[in-house]
Image (cartoon, grey):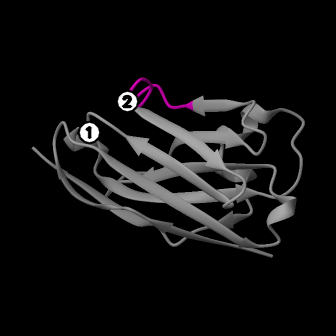
Amino acid sequence: QAQLAESGGGLVQAGGSLRLSCAASGNIFAIYGMGWFRQAPGKEREFVAAISRSGDSIYYADSVKGRFTISTDNAKNTVYLQMNRLKSEDTAAYSCAARTAELSMASLLKYDYYYNYWGQGTQVTVSA
């Protein structure tokens, strides 16, 4: 079993920055990759970014590419999402997720179906 705890959400003005953190505990040695997803009110959950544990494979949604950066600190068992140049459309509940078994293709980390652990989520609100 692995547990995930997000932090770092909040209210920020458009153009500002936030850094989200997701700390993993428990069966952490089994993590293959981690990702960030978000869900705005009335919308489906969408992929934001994902990273393999080794850091060799990194993926971003087109909507955040060039503005968000995902990184991992394996010593701290933490994955980060640095969000810069935030826009009002980035407002959502952000959740981190972990995959604890190897995938045939790391690119599958872009799909929420392949994750088996989820955090509670942290709210990000960007004011215009």
Q: Quadrant of residue 92?
A: bottom left
Report the quarter where the N terminus lies.
bottom right
Residue 11 seen from this side: yes
Report the front residue among 104 and 45. Answer: 104
Task: Please report the residue visible at 72 percent of the width from the left and 57 percent of the height from the top.
Answer: 75
Report the quarter where the C terminus lies.
top left
Q: Residue furthest left?
A: 128
Q: Position of residue 12 (x, y in %)?
A: 19, 52
Mark 1 residue type:
Leu
Q: Residue furthest front?
A: 75
Task: From the image, tell me which residue sits under label 2.
Answer: 67
Task: From the image, tell me which residue sits under label 1.
Answer: 86
Mark 2 residue type:
Arg
Task: Please report the residue visible at 66 percent of the width from the left and 61 percent of the height from the top.
Answer: 76
Which segment did they paint magenta? 60-67
Q: Evaluate if marks 1 and 2 touch, with contact meaning CB atoms under 8 Å apart.
A: yes
Alpha-carbon neighbours of circle 1 within 10 Å: few (<14), some, or many (≥20)?
Answer: many
- Distance from Cα at disc 1 to Cα at disc 2: 8 Å
Q: Earlier in the sequence, mark 1 or mark 2?
A: 2
What is the chief secondary structure element of the magenta stretch?
loop
Q: Position of residue 48 (x, y in %)?
A: 50, 41
Q: Secondary structure at mark 1?
A: loop
**Vertical side of 20 occupied by 110: above or below:** above
Report the number of discs: 2
Task: Please report the residue visible at 51 percent of the width from the left and 72 percent of the height from the top.
Answer: 120
Q: Position of residue 112 (x, y in %)?
A: 64, 50
